[in-house]
Image (cartoon, rainbow, N blue to C red):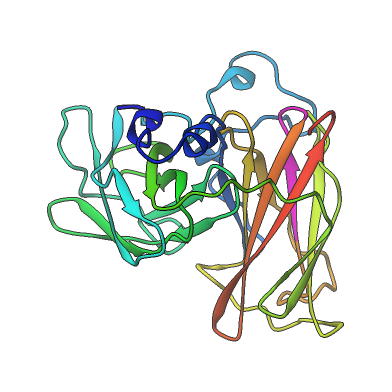
């Protein structure tokens, strides 16, 4: 059943909200400045920052498909109530339909789960647990009714490359439409101010640097989180496509624990993007969100 049919009983406004689609891609900035798993996130530009030609340029980005490479994301939970802590369950199945029970560990976890609302106003980065029968589950509380996209990022033990599979989720309740936040280069979360320096350029690599401060003072006590000092998740409006994002190595003389976390991103096309930066301070993970446009994005 399509997402529109699932929520037909909500309201006409909710149905209209489901018409838009968004994409997500996740990367991390390693503590040691090393590279991330490139196989899980298709490159959309060559080393010189120019768009690739041929098969690489036409490769379907992760998250657009529920099945890929012989694996399928079987979302056992079709809908959840808004504002209520409940359990989300799913299974990853192989080409024979059997649950996958062996995975490689990536960034300290066998599977990373991202849940994002289609309006890009709600976002969760979760790490579910797996039962012996291959069923994954995680508690989650989603704040608003509407359409959501669930992304599972993992590498099966039997596979050569990582996968990101996506499926739709309906969150029931009283729905109210929200406009995409306006573009801005600063965001405030939990008393921290995060500044974004750099702009996205279609088809070319762009440097993005996030600086964390509190009460006007640079924060130099960023803590490792899943083996990284910063996780950047990028969503493009319209088709759920990933941006190509990878971390930059630490510049000589730069404090490893902040206040800056830098990435290189390639926007595959003009458009509007939503960027989510996870960082950890004081044993707590905080998420700063930004809206960015590039080219003729709107």
- Rendered view: 35 above or below 277: above
Q: Residue furthest front?
A: 11
What's the residue at 67%, 29% (across, down)?
44
Number of on-image labels:
0
What's the residue at 56%, 49% (across, down)?
26
- Rendered view: 43 above or below 175: above
Side of 86 relative to 257 (left or right): left
- Rendered view: 231 above or below 191: above
Side of 294 relative to 278 (left or right): right
Residue 159, horizontal then vertical, whole percent = 33, 37
Q: Is residue 124 magenta?
A: no
Side of 249 relative to 168 (left or right): right
Q: Which quadrant is the N terminus positioned in?
A: top left
Residue 209 image-quadrant placement: bottom right
Side of 218 relative to 106 (left or right): right
Residue 68 visible in the displayed image: no
Residue 182, horizontal then vertical, whole percent = 78, 49
Q: Nearer the viewer, residue 250 or 137?
A: 137
Residue 254 visible in the displayed image: yes
Residue 110, horizontal then vertical, whole percent = 35, 56
Q: Is residue 268 magenta?
A: yes
What's the residue at 53%, 24% (across, down)?
60
Q: Which quadrant is the C terminus positioned in?
A: top right
Q: Which residues are magenta?
A: 262-270
Residue 87, horizontal then vertical, whole percent = 28, 60
């Amino acid at each position: 059943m399509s997402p529109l049919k699932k929520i037909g009983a909500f309201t006409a406004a909710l149905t209209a909200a489901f018409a838009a689609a968004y994409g997500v891609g996740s990367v991390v900035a390693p503590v040691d400045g090393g590279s991330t798993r490139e196989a899980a996130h298709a490159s959309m530009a060559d080393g010189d920052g120019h768009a690739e030609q041929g098969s690489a340029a036409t490769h379907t980005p992760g998250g657009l498909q529920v099945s890929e490479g012989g694996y399928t994301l079987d979302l056992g939970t079709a809908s959840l109530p808004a504002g209520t802590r409940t359990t989300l369950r799913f299974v990853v199945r192989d080409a024979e339909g059997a649950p996958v029970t062996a995975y490689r560990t990536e960034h300290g976890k066998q599977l990373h789960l991202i849940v994002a609302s289609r309006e890009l106003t709600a976002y969760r980065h979760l790490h579910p647990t797996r039962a012996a029968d291959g069923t994954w589950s995680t508690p989650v509380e989603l704040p608003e009714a509407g359409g959501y996209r669930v992304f599972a990022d993992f590498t099966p033990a039997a596979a050569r490359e990582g996968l990101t599979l996506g499926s739709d989720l309906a969150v029931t309740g009283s729905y109210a439409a929200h406009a995409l936040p306006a573009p801005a280069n600063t965001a405030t979360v939990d008393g921290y101010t995060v500044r974004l320096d750099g702009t996205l350029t279609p088809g070319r690599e762009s440097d993005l640097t996030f600086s964390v401060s509190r009460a006007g003072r640079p924060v130099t006590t960023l803590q490792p989180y899943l083996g990284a000092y910063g996780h950047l998740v990028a969503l493009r409006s319209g088709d759920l496509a990933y941006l190509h994002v990878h971390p930059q190595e630490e510049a000589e003389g730069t404090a490893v624990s902040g206040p800056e976390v830098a990435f290189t991103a390639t926007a595959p096309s003009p458009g509007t993007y939503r960027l989510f930066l996870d960082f950890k301070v004081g044993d707590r993970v905080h998420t700063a969100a930004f809206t960015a446009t590039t080219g003729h994005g709107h």
